[in-house]
Image: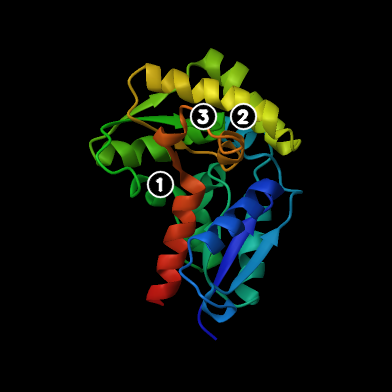
Amino acid sequence: MKKILGVLGGMGPLATVDFLQKLIEETPATRDQEHVPVVAYSVPQMPERPPAIVGNGESPLPHMLEGVLTLKRAGAKAVAIACNTAHFWYDDLVRDGGLPILHIADAACASLGDARRVGLLATEGTVAAGFFQRRLASRGIDCLLSTPEEQRTMVLPAIEHVKRNELAQAHALAVRAARRLLENGAQAVVMGCTEIPLALEFEVSDVSPHCIDATRALARASVAWWRAA
């Protein structure tokens, strides 16, 4: 059998399914046997990632590491994590899990084209972690963030609505947040939380052409890894 991709998911469950759907969509297959072999670990009972990053929550690292090791025992040769914020623990998971992990921010940055000012829609944990900002800066790209008020009233509620499967409500808030970034000069908006694409893609809107889906970018990177393998 060709190399198997492991998917560390459950953060949240709907976002994991979205990644798997996009993995299929991005695979140039004409029959079942040409699709990427996958094993998925989708266990939602992991501690919340943002509180752990900002210093007032239990670390999810032991739980995520258990997932990576489970995927390794199941035959996975590389891992895709269907959660942006979880990449705060990327180095620990690679070191202690013993598998290469495809980084979602690297995949998203590779999809930006000529954009020089990019907005980021993400959890407070991902923003605090700074891995998107560092990767964008290394490419000479300015990163625009939502204001604390916009984060509190638009971005985080949109994510919470997705977790409750309330996609229409999530869509309205996420569109407003993306539009603010574009109005402030962003040439593109990275959907840097795996719930955000589910919100923004619920319906086509005026912001849709300007949005970069980190989940789909990770799916493309996963397909490229498998085809190269």
Residue 110 % position (x, y): 33, 50
Residue 162 % position (x, y): 68, 36
> Mark 3 belongs to which amino acid?
Ser
Question: Are the residues at dot 2 and dot 1 in contact (C-beta closer than 8 Å)?
Answer: no
In the rendered structure, which disc, 3 or 2, sits on the residue that comes first in sequence? 2
The residue shown at (35%, 45%) is: 109
Q: Secondary structure at mark 3?
A: loop
Residue 213 % position (x, y): 47, 43
Q: CA distance from mark 3 to mark 2?
A: 9 Å
Q: Residues within 10 Å of mark 1 (few under 14, many from 20)?
A: many
**Rendered position, 9 above or below 99:** above
Image quadrant in which the N terminus is located: bottom right
The residue shown at (60%, 70%) is: 38
> Mark 2 belongs to which amino acid?
His
| Image quarter of residue 145 | top left
The residue shown at (60%, 31%) is: 55
Marking on residue 171:
2
Marking on residue 74:
none
The residue shown at (37%, 35%) is: 133
**Rendered position, 47 above or below 33:** above
> Mark 1 belongs to which amino acid?
Ala
Left-right relation of 45 to 192: right
Image quadrant in which the C terminus is located: bottom left
In the rendered structure, which disc, 1 or 3, sits on the residue that comes first in sequence? 1
Marking on residue 205:
3
Snapshot colouring? rainbow
